[in-house]
Amino acid sequence: MEPGGATATPASTAGPNAGPNAGPNAGTEGMAAPQAADFALPAPDLTDKAAKGASIASVALVISTLMPWVTVTFFNSATLAGVRLAEGRITMVLAFLAAVCALTALVMDTNRRTLLLGSAVLGALSLIATIVFAFRFHDAFSIPVALGGQEATALVDAGIGLDVGWYLAIASSLALIAIAAFGYLRGRPRTAVPHLTWVDPQP
């Protein structure tokens, strides 16, 4: 009690040296709350999924070269598989190399992005070879002169067309390019550290 009956009031109710009964928020009024962005995890590494997808697309591209690329109807139906054509053989070799790159990226911990980029480039070259064939598939069959020369050639041209294998090659090449390029762009470089194993962060 002060003279005159006045009651003294404390200047502050809580401080850094508050007693044992102080609440959990005592002394934290001036501190900034942590932002959610400070605890955000890095974007997931998608090279694993991209490598699997690129491997499947490469295998499908190899299979497409074993299927008919061109068919002709002239007295009877005839087909030619892609592997019997120059562009088809080139596509098969490129698809095989792309599959090797994709499978290697699947089992390795380093250089994954580089291997996926290689698969995308090989897929683009396969697409070019397949498109080139579309401009010359009319020359895939040779017509003997005994069958009528120009007249027979005109009939064959009217009955010749691209077959299911060629369309599968186009689709597989596009899928290979898209998946491998996506993995290259969304992947993260990995640095090999002795005696340490890479572990992806859990979402």
Image (cartoon, rainbow, N blue to C red):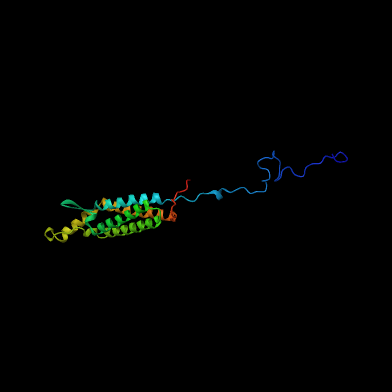
**Residue located at (41% from left, 52% from top):** 47
Name the spot of residue 160 as percent of width and height, x first: 22, 54
Name the spot of residue 175 as percent of width and height, x first: 35, 52
Name the spot of residue 195 as percent of width and height, x first: 43, 52
Numbered-mark total? 0
The residue positioned farthest toward the right in the image shown: 4
Say whether residue 145 is left or right of residue 175.
Answer: left
Compared with 9, 156 (above or below) is below
Q: Nearer the viewer, residue 121 or 104?
A: 104
Say whether residue 75 is left or right of residue 61.
Answer: left
Q: In which quarter of the view is residue 150 placed?
A: bottom left
Q: Nearer the viewer, residue 175 or 189?
A: 189
The residue positioned farthest toward the left in the image shown: 146
Say whether residue 16 is left or right of residue 169.
Answer: right
Compared with 9, 197 (above or below) is below
Name the spot of residue 117 as percent of width and height, x first: 38, 57
Q: Quadrant of the N terminus?
A: top right
**Residue located at (34% from left, 55% from top):** 101
